[in-house]
Amino acid sequence: MPQKTDDTSDARKGAGDKPASKSGLMTAKPDWNDDSDNSGLNPRDYVSSLARGLEVLRAFNRTGRKMTLSQVAAETGNTRAGARRILLTLVHEGYAVADGKLFDLTPQVLELGFSVLSSKGVWDVARPFIDHLSEELRESVSGAVLDNFDVVYVSGTQYHRIISVGISVGARYPAHCTANGRVLLAAQPLEVWPDMLKEITLDRKTDMTITDRDEFRKELERVREQGWSLVDQELEKGLMSIAVPLRSASGGLVGAINVGVPLLRMTPKEMVDEVLPKLQATVANISEALKH
């Protein structure tokens, strides 16, 4: 059984440190000389051990691979002893497994986010439309939401063919090189674009990935104007994807839906001419269904 730690003492020890702001939950630096910061957080209420545990979970998401204790400690800035306690706790609670010297997350971590998504009901409404489009096109269709500069896939239907494109629910990919990600980034308020374009990391996934910031901005402007995005082999060679944003009945951005197709089955022009109209009609039907 993992060794228990005193979270209260962790809060006192962390009272001189600024909480991690990667998730955007805290945007102003707290003034720990007062009882609370501008957001109303009292330093005595901040549980640093919980924050360190969440950072370990995020580290597995970032790397997408199994890691040793030393790798987890280096990736998160924890000590080896601290990382060990966190990992053993995750194993004990069923959120991680240990395979020799390697640690990995279990599917149980999906429960942490799915309850929030399912409570909103949007993707429950969208699911039969997604299934129908997949059956009509005989291709895989997925729905995703934006999480900082990543897209997280929250719904989808994999159409099984000899060569198929399937993205599992819970998968996370960089937004800059995915069709879903681009329509969601392009739909952000224009006032956040300067900071967004400055902070986003344009990693090269293939030799076709856009990595120049000026070129990327022009691409987002084009996507925003036309209302859809086609990504041709920028995430993975041989794979194309086309996406449109999904909006609620009130016009608020909910997520995006895309169709993925191997390049050997269709050209980019065929994607726009044949797939895009059906995808747009499907999204319009979902938006209409959300009104009821």
Image (spheres, rainbow, N blue to C red):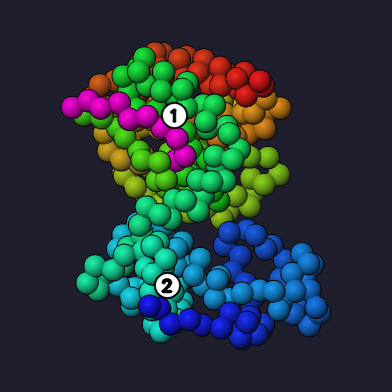
Q: Which mark is residue 89?
A: 2
Quadrant location, the N terminus:
bottom left
Residue type, mark 1 in image: Asn
Whether residue 269 appears in this view of the structure is: no
Query: Magenta residues?
Result: 153-162
User: Mark 2: which amino acid?
Assistant: Thr
Kindly report which numbered mark, 1 or 2, lies closer to the viewer in this rendering. 2
User: As rendered, which of 181 and 84 lies closer to the eye?
Assistant: 84
Does 112 appear in magenta? no
87, above or below 146, in the image? below
Q: Which residue is denoted by mark 1 in the rendering?
A: 258
Mark 2 secondary-structure assignment:
helix
Distance between mark 1 and mark 2 Cα atoms: 37 Å
The spot of residue 236 in percent (x, y) is 30, 40
Depicted 140 relative to depicted 107: above or below: above
Q: Does 219 sit left or right of 272 as displayed? A: right
Q: Position of residue 153 (x, y in %)?
A: 44, 40
- Residue at the image position 71 percent from the left and 71 percent from the top: 29
* Secondary structure beneath label 1: strand
- Of residues 7 and 271, which is closer to you in this image? 7
Answer whether residue 154 is magenta in the image. yes
Q: Position of residue 188 (x, y in %)?
A: 63, 40
Q: What residue is rendered at 51% in x and 50% in y?
A: 113
Left of 121 or right of it: where is 66?
left
Check the picture and name the quadrant holding the C terminus: top right
The count of marks equals 2
